């Protein structure tokens, strides 16, 4: 059986008092910041929803205007609705990724 030696934990060379002190500092920082709560989560969902809905509706509105003023072989409404949806989804994805990075950076700061 080819067994690898156990890797030393990063906390192995630190004293128990150091570890407890670090955890206490993290806990105090978390208490000062406060918990995000349900309303924060609902607000985030609403913000993501609006970041998708606004470009989609704007694309549809511009498409309707173009179809009325410049009728042609192809409908602008559907094309711009889809373009607005894609733009809105990209915008929401970028925003959520940025928030995720910020949360992970705060978690790493708390762990350090």
Image: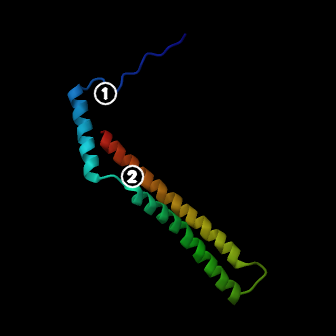
Element under label 2? helix
Depth check: 50 or 31 in front?
Answer: 31
* Label 2 neighbour load within 10 Å: few <14, some 14-19, many 20+: few
Q: Distance between the residues labelled 1 and 2?
A: 25 Å
Residue 64 vs 5, above or below: the answer is below
Residue position for label 1: 11
Using residue 56 as the reference point, say whether residue 77 is left or right of it: right
Using residue 8 as the reference point, say whether residue 13 is left or right of it: left
Residue 96 location in percent, x, y?
A: 48, 56
Determine the residue located farthest toward the bottom in the rendered image.
Answer: 69
Residue 49 location in percent, x, y?
A: 53, 65
Q: Which residue is drawn at 66% across and 80% down?
A: 63
Determine the residue located farthest toward the front in the rendered image.
Answer: 38
Quarter of the image where the C terminus is located: top left
Element under label 1? loop
Identify the disc placed on residue 102. Answer: 2
Residue 66 vs 106, above or below: the answer is below
- In which quarter of the view is residue 90 placed? bottom right
Depth check: 34 or 81 in front?
Answer: 34
Using residue 24 as the reference point, say whether residue 37 is left or right of it: right
Residue 25 vs 39, above or below: the answer is above
Depth check: 76 or 52 in front?
Answer: 52
Quarter of the image where the N terminus is located: top right
Residue 39 vs 31, above or below: the answer is below
Of pointers 1 and 2, the one earlier in the residue sequence: 1
């Amino acid at each position: 059986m080819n067994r690898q030696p156990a890797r030393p934990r990063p906390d192995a060379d630190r004293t128990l008092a150091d570890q407890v002190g670090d955890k206490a500092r993290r806990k105090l920082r978390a208490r000062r910041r406060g918990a995000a709560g349900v309303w924060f989560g609902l607000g985030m969902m609403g913000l993501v929803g609006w970041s998708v809905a606004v470009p989609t509706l704007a694309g549809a509105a511009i498409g309707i205007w173009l179809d009325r003023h410049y009728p042609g072989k192809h409908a602008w409404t559907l094309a711009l609705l889809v373009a607005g949806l894609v733009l809105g989804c990209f915008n929401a994805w970028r925003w959520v990724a940025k928030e995720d990075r910020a949360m992970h950076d705060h978690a790493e700061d708390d762990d350090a």
